[in-house]
Image (cartoon, grey):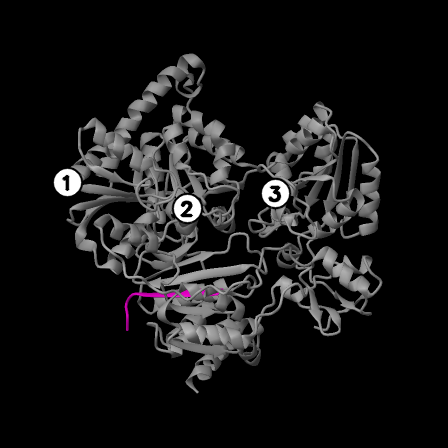
Amino acid sequence: MAQPLLADNPGLKKLLLGNEAIVRGALEAGVQVVTCYPGTPSSEVPDTFFRLSKEGDFSFEYSVNEKVALEVGGGATLAGAMTLTTMKHVGVNVAADPLMTLAYIGTPGGLVLLSADDPGCHSSQNEQDNRYYARLAGMPCFEPSSAQEAKDMTRDALNMSRETSTPILLRTTTRVNHLRGPVEFGPIAKLAPAAGFKKNPSKFVPIPAFARPMHVALLKKLEELRELAEKSEYNKVTGNGKVGIVAAGICRAYLSDALADSGLADKFKVLELGFSYPLPEKLVTDFISSVDKVLIIEELEPFIENEIRILAQKNSITIEVIGKDNVNLPLNGEYSTGNVSAVMHEVLGLKQDKVTLCEAEEGLPMRPPNLCAGCPHRAAYYAAKKVFGPDAICSSDIGCYTLGILPPLNAADFLLCMGSSISAGSGISKAAGQTTLGFIGDSTFFHSGITGLVNAVFNQHDILLVILDNSTTAMTGHQPNPGVETTLIGSNPAQVSIEAIVKGCGVNDVRTVSPLNQKAMTKALEELKAIKGVRVLIAKDPCPLFAKRALGKKPGQTAYVANQSDDVIRCMEEIACPAFEKCEDGVKINEILCSGCMLCLQLTKDIKARKRSS
Amino acid sequence: MSTRLRIFMTGVGGQGTLTATNLLAQAILDSGTDLTAGEIHGMAQRGGVVESAILIGMASPKIAHGEADIILGFEPLETLRALPYLKPNGIVLSSTEYVAPLSVSTGKAEQTPLELIKDRVNACASKAYFVPCQRLGLEAGAIQSGNIALLGALCATGLIPLKPEELAETIKSVMKPKIADINLKALQLGVDAISK
């Protein structure tokens, strides 16, 4: 059976994840090239394309980082292909360089950049508002609030990008990426094959002489796009109240429920902005002229609020603008139906019925995220801490292994961004001569670790880099990277060797060992400890979840406690493997959770291996 | 029956909380009712808390404190942790069988007693149902199907616009026959568990 997402089946209604809806929208527009770097909450978009890639009529790649993804996508759209490039919000920082210029030279085939923002930091190091990028680059911005809109806006943004030759930002937030809702399918467009790149240096080569008129042209184009925003069906006015509310993104969903819950719908006139930049100034001016005061509801930055304040001043409209400074609408975190409702009441001067909530129970045991049972990173950290002691500085990076921050491993002392472990670690060691270990994953090494390594060699820094190579991109859901042997849909025919790259960068002291072999791992660490300069240890063993799922590897053996002893308790306390459980007579090992990594056997004689019972 | 309803689901990563959410959401949609569902798992690899939500007749994918009509707890400690989400006089359905957090299994923290959890739930909810999900799952043929038993129990309460037969139809349409059989049995065991 053909994949329903790929089939031309207009009218079908399916429950889709927001991210799946984005995929369907792109397919309906006739998308021809998809590039990405995975990152939560965007990952299911490329992952769905990846699964469909054998049957689908588009080309797909996991690029090594976001800059590369946007550059490949940029080339594809210049050659006339309808293109989607996806990443999480912090990925756009990496891609910002090509992005700024792409808006100047234009996107003849169409190009939509998905920026999946994360208010509330559910899975990110910050909660930056990427609507800044739309304004900085001069690109239109769409902000869906439902699965249906995620689908429709992706389709419409791609088409608009192609018609206007402007890159468009599809700005989602975690709640939109990870909601599920009914989506009614439309027809799938079949585009002619990409026509190929047509040479025109004055249009496509931004040397200063050409860049200046390009900027002028972009500013003119933004005014044309503003006209499209004025007429867009995603920007609509409802209700007749005396108080206005302007809402964008997922806040539109919270507002809709708050209006229904509170029974205050007739008090408000609402302007929803789904196509939020360039701001439809006429629509907004008319709106604020028609109400007594206006409340602005948008998560994170007060973009629309400030633009409305400016519009009111420019047009001499005396109106109270209520936003981040006036009521409880913070600049951080997510909003909710509840806080939107509270603000609505406050603006009307109404008291809200006080609801007595069930109290949170104090002191419940927490469930922090943890390295899985059998994770080879645990073994690598354990050996490194043993050899280097607690005072060595651990420069961490972005991935599952960041969870090594938790005690007892305490293996992450600071972190800047993807790929920073070696470069920032180099800085620590350079500034004060502290012993520094950098930890980076295989995908992150390809992402942006290589340049830091080249820099460390060239500038003669003193650092030991441990590349934690678990043969997949584990944190975001087992996406392939250039170094992997196998992907979720087959083998990697073009494997790139990390060891060869490291040597090619000019590192002479390189070892590759399995961290699950503690003797070899410890020996390699001790040898490298004795040397100065840039040294690299590649700690290589597959992620056990990936090994089970993709490689079909099932552990034949399980560890068990043969003799209860202090040594067993010490082992449990030092490695904190989730397969260990305290029990009446001491400690036992949960056979269902044990992955058979056998790290614990190497730490105490009182734990032994046996065949699994099932 | 209310056409506007918020169901808050909570469990532990790896338990199948999201699979159960998707199945329930698909079944409600199949039965002709539109809904929005949401999930937040972030960095919760296996062993972290997973929270999800189904909202009927609403636009938002999110349930805030004091808003849930129903809490569905796939693990008792997480049921207790989620109680602030319950609206006054809401309903709770919870598994009674633990998945111990690491701090408990390594002896660093005490397991919260089931009696205390039941007391707190009963004090908050207008009605509460406790179901031994893992045991029912094992009885049906697979421990993971215990979640479906809890969904069966939910349908049997008559509180949501979905009958157990309708959930069964969706199970048959989305699962392979062998797995569907186990889950259909679990569904029935869940229905029986609260009908007694």
Disc number placed over residue A173 in the picture, else none: 2
Q: Earlier in the sequence, mark 2 or mark 3?
A: 2
Give the x, y percent position of residue A312.
21, 32
Q: Which residues are the magenta region? A: B1-10
The residue carrying mark 3 is: A481
How crowded pointer 1 is (Cα within 10 Å; few <14, some 14-19, many 20+) is rated as: some
Give the x, y percent position of residue B81.
49, 64
The chain that hosts pointer 1 is A
The residue sitting at 55% across, 55% down in the picture is: B44
Q: Residue A491: within the magenta?
A: no
- Which of A154 and A94 lies nearest the eye of the viewer? A94
Disc 1, SS = loop
The residue carrying mark 1 is: A290
The residue sitting at 26% across, 36% down in the picture is: A229
Disc 2, SS = strand
- Regarding residue B96, the answer to whether it shows in the image is no
* Disc 2 residue type (three-letter): Thr
Is A450 above or below relative to A28?
above
Q: Could you confirm whether marks 2 and 1 are on the same chain?
A: yes
How crowded pointer 2 is (Cα within 10 Å; few <14, some 14-19, many 20+) is rated as: many
Mark pair 2, 3: CA separation: 25 Å
Q: Could you confirm whether marks 3 and 1 are on the same chain?
A: yes
* Disc 3 residue type (three-letter): Asn
Q: Are marks 2 and 3 in contact (CB under 8 Å)?
A: no
Quadrant holding the C terminus of chain B: bottom left
The residue sitting at 72% across, 40% down in the picture is: A466
